[in-house]
Amino acid sequence: MLLIVRLKHTNHLPPPLSEAQVAGNSLIGACPSMDTRYSRQLLFAPIGKEGQKKLGASRVAIVGAGALGAVLANHMVRAGVGFVRIIDRDFVEPSNLQRQMLYDEEDAANHLPKAAAAAEKLKKVNSEVIIDPVIADVTAVNAEELLADCDLILDGTDNFAIRFLINDVAVKHNIPWVYGGAVSAKGMFATIRPHVTPCLRCLIPEPPSGGETCDTAGVIGPIIHIVASYQAVEGLKILVGDQKHRNPHLEHMEIWRNFHTRINLTDKKNPDCPACGKGVFEFLDLSGKEDTFTSLCGRNSVQISPTRDRHVNLDELMERFTPLGKVERNKFLLRFHVDNHYILVVFPNGRVVVQGTDDITIARSLYAKYIGA
Amino acid sequence: MITIKLFAAMAEEAGKETIEMTWQEGMTTEDVKRWLAEQYPSLASRIPAAMVAVNQEFAAFANPLQDGDEVAFIPPVSGG
Ligand SMILES: [Zn+2]
């Protein structure tokens, strides 16, 4: 059985199996036994049998399935977390492949949404885990629905607007979460346990504007794996309930120039913090919210997020657009080429990414012309 | 004397990692922020979003300072 699977997936013959391997295979059978799958993790005393049971009963949400998110999802699924929700708004592009470990050239060629591609890969890794891919932008409208039913939230995002939203949901519903960020060769992470440690708004009084992003300052693969792996291990400590060994620091490193520092967060909550001090969740406030047009900096794209999900029939759109220009379509999205210059990427929930411009005015007019108000 | 330590993009912006500032009785981290923004206007826009640590302990609000303290400014890392 194992042999057949291997043959199907390789172009050349595998080396002949040794006698021991053959004997092992016939003992194991078609499916790797669950007693052996986690054997190394069960031997690790701080997890052990009890911890493994807790992991299996846990629900984790991973926000963002880019570079950090792919590593986080990989660790959670392999470790045997029972339910893993992977939320991402993007589709795989060739420039992701240098560091986003779950994706390949075929995913990029097919413009597969990252959440779907990640789920597809990881189902093959561990079929016992329930993987729930969600292709969406996390917004004030859907954040609680997507995050509040989980025991832990892991930050695989690339911007502070979403992190402040995660923080509001986490504090409001008392869910621990692990912040992580990486750019160039620099990285940072911190565990946030609402009402125990400072929350993100205690740490950062204002959402930073500008600053470096991976799309402007670049990033190298190793810092991604380092930061996300630190986040993952803090996540595992939370899920198995090991309070004693949790990392009380915000850690900051630059791995090209060999620098590492930490600041202690113990007992440093800000009593005036709007979120954890006063219970005011500004980032979840929907009053006065309109459809948002966001320039995706460095990517020559503008994203349009409708305030409320609106159901878009991609088949109908395809019919409408086909006489007007080239249309590509997969199960998850539609790409419509306008004037050989712009591409409108339309998702079934009404979200649109206009590629080929970072000018919100141009994106607004293309959106009005082809999708409607 | 207060030693101000700048990290990442703030150090690059200021062209140095360490700045010394005269200590005065009753001084807090807020005074350091104000002084730094005046002396290095290119840092002014980054100071409000930077995390502040005094002697490697996070300082959430106006922290009183002692002579010899180290005050670090760490701009949060966003990408992922
Ligand atoms: Zn707080």
Image: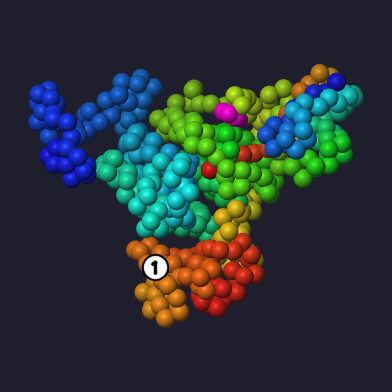
Q: Which residue is mark 1?
A: A328
Residue furthest to the front in view is A12
Give residue A180's quadrant in the image.
top right
In the rendered view, does B56 fall on the left or right side of A284? Answer: right
For the point 22% across and 28% down, which residue is it?
Answer: A36
Residue in front for this viewpoint, A202 or A17 = A17
- Residue A187 in percent (x, y) is at 57, 34
Residue in front for this viewpoint, A8 or B25 = A8
Q: Secondary structure at mark 1?
A: strand
Quadrant where the image shows the N terminus of chain A: top left
For the point 59% across and 34% down, which residue is it?
Answer: A186
- Residue A364 in percent (x, y) is at 60, 71
What range is drawn magenta here?
A252-256
In the rendered view, does A337 fall on the left or right side of B60? Answer: left
- Residue A31 in percent (x, y) is at 17, 37
Q: Amino acid at mark 1?
A: Glu
The subunit carrying tag 1 is: A
For the point 77% across and 33% down, which residue is it?
Answer: B15
For the point 35% across and 44% down, which residue is it?
Answer: A83
Give residue A122's quadrant in the image.
top left
